[in-house]
Image (tube, rainbow, N blue to C red):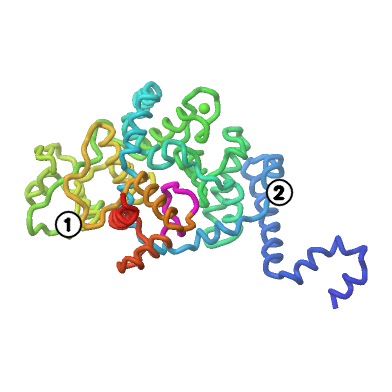
């Protein structure tokens, strides 16, 4: 009936086009209408928060939602990454080399940041290296689109609304241009991968141009990272912790980042430092971390490990940052190997693995060292051919198998 009316009256077609679309694809159109209505509400609320109408109308008013961020929001990880895979890629020789070069290149800025915030250069550079590969991986999604979508759709709208307004405020205040403000689907952006609200609280202008720019200013980024850590309770001059060795028959139930005990307790339990040095008798509380159970590397970690953890709320990432900082200070790898007979591989080895897969005819895109769905699928295929469990994991064993098949 309505369709007939539209068809018979061409003059109103333009005005009723949305209705026509609604008949063709009711759910998409309804959600677009809801999105427009949501943006209207956000416009009012943005004004109440002191964000200029001009900024909203320029950067948001015509926005289309990006529904793919909702898939990311609800995605269940299909593949649980072992800690040794994280560490192998996050703290490889390439990142240690890059980190040392960055320490040299930004020495003066890092020294000034240490004077002001009390956080040492190696720690700051390690956060930078793990969060954005020293500013090379910033994330490509337009931040306002991701956050605008998440503010209007999905299951965490209140939280993302706050981040959306914060992102708009960053633009409106002239710190970062809208087109430079890209990031992860969830809104972390820039060289430090701050959320917009974290930016508003903690970003600092350290190159003195009056703008806090975590996308294009390395000094601002390094100093903001140092400020984040200082405000998180960083203790100047204290180490994050160190690797230890446990005695045979150790009761692993005392492990856990929150169970801090004085050193006398750990000494009493027979814990020793992995490098043979005596445990520090400094009275500080430390917790035992067993990232892969008691048969893997063990660590005693202090307050500064918690501060690093505050950056990303994952022990694997905090350990990567902590370990990278040790490597940048000339420290070695862990003494105790990870409890696996198929160790993780570096980014150089991941690229090699991908080149071998491509040479065998797998369509996995470029050999960029990023292990995505297509690479995993190709690995699983090869594992199946080899008669081993097709788990799709990029480890040393499949790399060596492909090497030998290629005659390398
Ligand atoms: Ca600046």
State yes or no: residue 80 in magenta. Answer: no
Q: Is mark 2 within 8 Å of ligand 1?
A: no
Question: Dominant secondary structure of the magenta stretch?
Answer: loop
Residues 255 and 327: in front is 327
**Mark 2, residue position:** 61
The numbered mark at residue 294 is: 1
Q: Nearer the viewer, residue 341 or 232?
A: 341
For label 1, the crowd category at 10 Å Cα-Cα, with few meaning under 14, some 14 to 19 and many 20 or more, is: some
Please state which of residues 387 and 336 is positioned toward the viewer in this rendering.
387
Region rendered in magenta:
365-376
Left or right position of 23 against 75: right
Name which quarter of the figure residue 107 lies in: top left
Please state the horizontal and vertical placement of residue 72, each as a whole percent of the image. Answer: 51, 59
| Relative vertical location of residue 234 with respect to residue 364 in this rendering, above or below | above
26 versus 47 height, above or below = below
Which residue is the extreme one toward the front?
407
Say which label, 1 or 2, has the lower sequence index.
2
Camera sees residue 4: yes
Crowding near the residue tagged with mark 2, few <14, some 14–19, many ≥20 C-alpha atoms within 10 Å:
some
Disc 2, SS: loop
- Tell me residue 138's x, y (percent): 49, 41
Using the image, determine if residue 169 lies above or below residue 204.
below
Percent across and percent down for residue 21 are 76, 66
The spot of residue 53 in percent (x, y) is 70, 42
Provide the secondary structure element on which disc 1 rests.
loop
């Amino acid at each position: 009936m309505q369709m007939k009316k539209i068809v018979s009256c061409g003059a109103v077609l333009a005005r009723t086009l949305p209705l026509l679309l609604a008949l063709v694809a009711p759910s998409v159109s309804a959600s677009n209408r809801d999105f427009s209505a949501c943006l209207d509400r956000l416009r009012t609320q943005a004004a109440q928060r002191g964000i200029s109408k001009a900024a909203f109308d320029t950067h948001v008013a015509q926005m289309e939602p990006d529904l793919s961020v909702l898939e990311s929001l609800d995605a269940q990880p299909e593949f649980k990454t072992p800690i040794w895979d994280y560490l192998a890629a996050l703290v490889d020789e390439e990142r240690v080399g890059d980190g040392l070069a960055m320490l040299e290149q930004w020495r003066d800025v890092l020294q000034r940041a240490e004077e002001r915030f009390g956080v040492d250069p190696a720690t700051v550079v390690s956060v930078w290296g793990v969060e954005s590969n020293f500013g090379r991986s910033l994330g490509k999604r337009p931040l306002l689109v991701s956050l605008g979508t998440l503010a209007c759709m999905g299951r965490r709208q209140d939280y993302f609304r706050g981040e959306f307004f914060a992102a708009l405020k960053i633009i409106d205040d002239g710190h970062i241009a809208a087109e430079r403000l890209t990031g992860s689907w969830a809104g972390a952006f820039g060289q430090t991968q701050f959320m917009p609200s974290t930016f508003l609280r903690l970003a600092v202008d350290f190159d003195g141009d009056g703008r806090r720019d975590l996308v294009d200013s390395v000094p601002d980024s390094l100093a903001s990272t140092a400020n984040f850590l200082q405000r998180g309770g960083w203790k100047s001059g204290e180490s994050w912790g160190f690797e230890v060795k446990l005695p045979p028959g150790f009761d692993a139930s005392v492990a856990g980042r929150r169970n801090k005990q004085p050193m006398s307790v750990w000494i009493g339990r027979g814990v020793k430092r992995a490098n043979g040095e005596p445990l520090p008798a400094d009275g500080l509380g430390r917790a035992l971390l067993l990232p892969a159970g008691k048969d893997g590397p063990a660590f005693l970690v202090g307050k500064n490990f918690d501060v690093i953890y505050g950056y990303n709320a994952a022990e694997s990432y905090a350990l990567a940052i902590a370990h990278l900082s040790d490597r940048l200070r000339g420290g070695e790898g862990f003494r105790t190997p990870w409890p696996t007979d198929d160790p993780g591989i570096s980014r150089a080895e991941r690229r090699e693995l991908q080149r071998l897969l491509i040479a065998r005819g797998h369509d996995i895109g470029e050999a960029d060292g990023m292990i995505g769905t297509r690479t995993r699928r190709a690995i699983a295929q090869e594992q199946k051919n080899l008669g081993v469990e097709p788990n799709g994991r990029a480890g040393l064993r499949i790399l060596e198998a492909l090497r030998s098949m290629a005659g390398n």
